[in-house]
Amino acid sequence: MSNLTDIHPKIFISYAWANNNTTSFVLHLAERLSAHGVEVILDRWSLKEGQDKYSFMEKTVDDVSITNVLLVCNKAYKERADARRGGVGDETTVITPEIYGNASQTKFIPILLERDDNGNDYLPAYIKSRLYVDFSNENDYESAYEKLLRRLYDKPSYKQPPLGKPPEWLEEDSVNYNELNILVKKLKI
């Protein structure tokens, strides 16, 4: 992505309709991302009565215009994904082959919303090894949100510096360490 004004990421949010806390989190996140120029496809906004929910899920996962799919992981999401139960189970059936078959592995971003009593991540088995954005601690919400937004716009906090040229002295047959030592001493002054 070259210029922030040229491109708006388009995402789909997958989550379990578990409780009001999860729904509130997802709606707030979707609204905030939308306000920051991210086009959000959310079942509550986009899936209408009379539409086929399975077709909707498949299209959102397979749609090449969707740059990322956010997987909002909590206890309910993990349990339903691992058991292939409910809407999350159906989405998992569609998502899993895409994850394992896609070499770039950048479309799907786990969002950790909850941990168990021992501090273990509630991540489904098929994405357990993936790096995630951690929203499980309310105190870290803003830094997690910035990390996610940077990821969606492909604008990381830490960028690899450009590759430089090899030092000229590598081409010399012999190195004069005296001259090098003098230069180092000058730098220390």
Image (cartoon, rainbow, N blue to C red):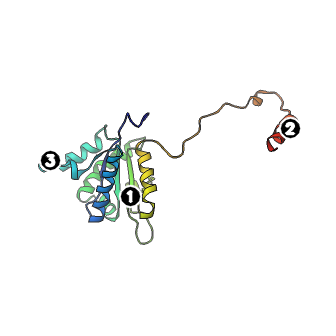
Closer to us: 142 or 126: 142
- Which numbered circle lies on residue 51? 3
Nearer the observer, disc 2 or disc 3?
2
Helix, strand or loop at label 1? It is helix
Provide residue 111's location: percent of width, then percent of height.
38, 55
- Which numbered circle lies on residue 182? 2
Q: Which residue of the protein is positioned furthest toward the left in this rendering?
A: 50
* Residue 188, picture quadrant: top right
Provide residue 112's location: percent of width, then percent of height.
40, 59
The amino acid sitting under disc 2 is: Ile
- Labels 2 and 1: the sequence-earlier one: 1
Helix, strand or loop at label 2? It is helix
Separation of disc 2 and disc 1 at Cα?
A: 59 Å
Nearer the observer, disc 2 or disc 1?
2
Identity of the residue drawn at 31% across and 37% down: 65
Nearer the observer, disc 3 or disc 1?
3
- Labels 3 and 1: the sequence-earlier one: 3
Res. 19 visible in picture: no
Separation of disc 2 and disc 3 at Cα?
A: 77 Å
Left or right side of 5 for 15: left
Do the residues under discs 2 and 3 have CB atoms within 8 angstroms?
Answer: no
The amino acid sitting under disc 3 is: Gln
The residue where tag 1 is placed is 125
Helix, strand or loop at label 3? It is loop
Res. 130 visible in picture: yes
- Which numbered circle lies on residue 158? none
Task: Give the answer, above or below, for where 9 lies relative to 148.
Answer: above
* Residue 114, picture quadrant: bottom left
Closer to us: 139 or 10: 139
The amino acid sitting under disc 1 is: Ala
Identity of the residue drawn at 44% across and 64% down: 139
Q: Quadrant of the C terminus?
A: top right
